[in-house]
Image (cartoon, coloured by chain):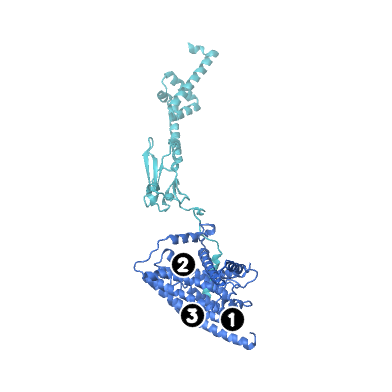
Amino acid sequence: MNGQGLIKGLAITLKHFFQKEITEQYPDVMPELAPRFRGCLRFEFEKCIACGICVNSCPNDVLSFETEKRDKSKKKKLLSYTIDFQYCMFCNLCVEGCPTSCLSFDHDFELSQFKREDIKMIYLRPEGLDEAQDSPADQEEQKDKEQKQIAAMLKALQKSPQKVLSKLLEGEEDINILSELIQSDQKTAGKIAELIVKDKEKAVKVATGFINKDRKNRAQKGENGEGGDKDV
Amino acid sequence: MEPLFINLAEAFTGWMISLGLDPGWAEAVLLVVKWIIVVTIITVNIIILIWLERKVSAFFQERLGPNRLGPFGIFQTIADAIKLLTKEDIVPSAADKLIFKTAPMFFIVVAVMLYTVIPMGKGMQVINLNVGLLFFISVGSLSTIALLMAGWGSNNKWSLMGAVRSVAQMVSYAIPLAFSLLGVVMITGSLNLQDIVLAQDKWWFVILQPIAFITYFIAATAELNRGPFDMPEAEQELTGGAYTEYTGMRWALFFLAEYTNLVAVSALMATVFLGGWQGPWLPSWLWIIIKTYAIILVFFWVKWTFPRIRMDHLMSFSWKVLVPVSLGNILLTGAGIYFCRWMGWC
């Protein structure tokens, strides 16, 4: 029948009339964002290993960073990280590529700025971030290396204590006493080897401590009656 | 509550006579006061109506509508009115200045004239004309001239196109409009709107004349230039039709007149088909307001549901459907009346 469609249309609009509004009153009420919503790109300085995968994966040259060669190792040291956000197209390639997941999109979408320069986000190296606080992967490697060095040192100490200790101590008598100690006591040897690798000054102090203690022990032994022959 | 306004009017005339005024002059002053009241009500009512239309259309589209100014955004229209009043009044240099300037005034005057005959309550009318319905139809058709003046005076092809369309549309739809009311007149035997209201104390004419009600509703929508028959305005294709060149208050007058017409036509529909001011419990002047607003809401509903009809379809619908249907309704009504008389029911 003619006019059926008209009534159907009126019914549809009437149904919508009583439905809930879908308007988002944005500045008053913040919208509910999906968990994987791509808002502002955030960078965590501590996690970055300066591998450059993000820079290579970015299609719009948004990302860039500055590095410096570290003193001892071949590793790079991150100095600053720049996100020129005006060119970002939120493709997520950098986030996917990052091996340490130091890049992530958060839910902040209010990114407008008054000046074009302000859009650029520059992350500088934090003050407290020294070698000890380097990336965890880095730290582990460092530890591994140290362990190896200590093991090598221990081996050398046990094989020819005089030679190694002559670099540490000066008095020939002291060296002899200590080398005797090292050969007789595994524990002392381990400790001294570790200290030599880690901190030479401390090693010297500890070594002299050991020597003095040993001397005292010997002197005590002498006092108890057997020391006569040594005095002679 | 019922005779509130009548008592007020009587008290006013009594006060005028007590001041030493001739009773005839007192009546004349009362008429002026009535006019002022009508115009004030219209203007205030428009503010509510525009807000209501924006709000209702928003709800139909699952939006919120104006909600910033005041509670539920009710002051939005007032802010808009202030903006329109303070806008620069631009008259195009190539325009026919006299016609351009008089068109909006003519339009609003014609719209306000419609209110003279509508019974706003029991015995409440500006003038109780015995040809009230005829007056309403003839004056209502005059707004065509205002639109034609606006279109011609603007000296703009879009304006003229819109004006030509509106004239064609209004002339075609005035015929089924008048014909659909004729059935009611035949039953009542009077063109006086108060008589028509009183004739509906048992049965509303919407029950006795359902076809007439529907044809009148459709024809009235076209007469009002409202959607889906808003071809003369047609923002998307005619950039506002006859109103294209109008700015500020002149444009606002057109806007005002359109809504004034809407209220007037709705009030007439309530009067003729829905029993006018008759109703239980509430005072009569409240009943007519309630009924008028109910019809206005239906107008809004229709406007925000249907897409705009094509011009040729519009014309063919009027001449090929509405005119024959309303003529058939007259025939049916006449036959029905004779049948009733023959059976001795009336």
Q: Nearer the viewer, mark 3 or mark 1?
A: 1
Residue plotted at (36% across, 50% down): A61
Mark 3 and mark 2 in contact? Answer it, CB < 8 Å. Answer: no
Q: Which residue is mark 2?
A: B255
Give the residue at x 55% y 67%.
A15
> Which residue type carries mark 1?
Thr
**Spatial CA span between label 3 and label 2:** 25 Å
Quarter of the image holding residue A170? top left
User: Residue tagged by mark 3?
Assistant: B175
- Check whether the beta carbons of the residues at disc 3 and disc 1 lie within 8 A of each other: no
Picture layout, residue A124 above or below residue B224: above
Q: Is residue B179 above or below residue B293?
A: below
Task: Please say whether residue B247 is visible from this viewpoint.
Answer: yes
Amino acid type of disc 2?
Answer: Phe
> What is the letter of the blue chain?
B
Read off the chain for label 1.
B
Q: Which residue is mark 1?
A: B188
- Mark 3 packing: few (<14 Cα in 10 Å), some, or many (20+)? some
Find residue A165 and report its horizontal and vertical position in percent: 42, 24
Q: Nearer the viewer, residue A188 or B213?
A: B213
Secondary element at image label 1: helix
Which chain is depicted cyan?
A: A
Q: Earlier in the sequence, mark 1 or mark 2?
A: 1
Q: Residue furthest front?
A: B20
| Name of the residue lying farthest toward the top | A232
Q: Residue at x 42, y 70 (%)?
A: B103
Pointers 1 and 2 in contact (CB under 8 A)? no
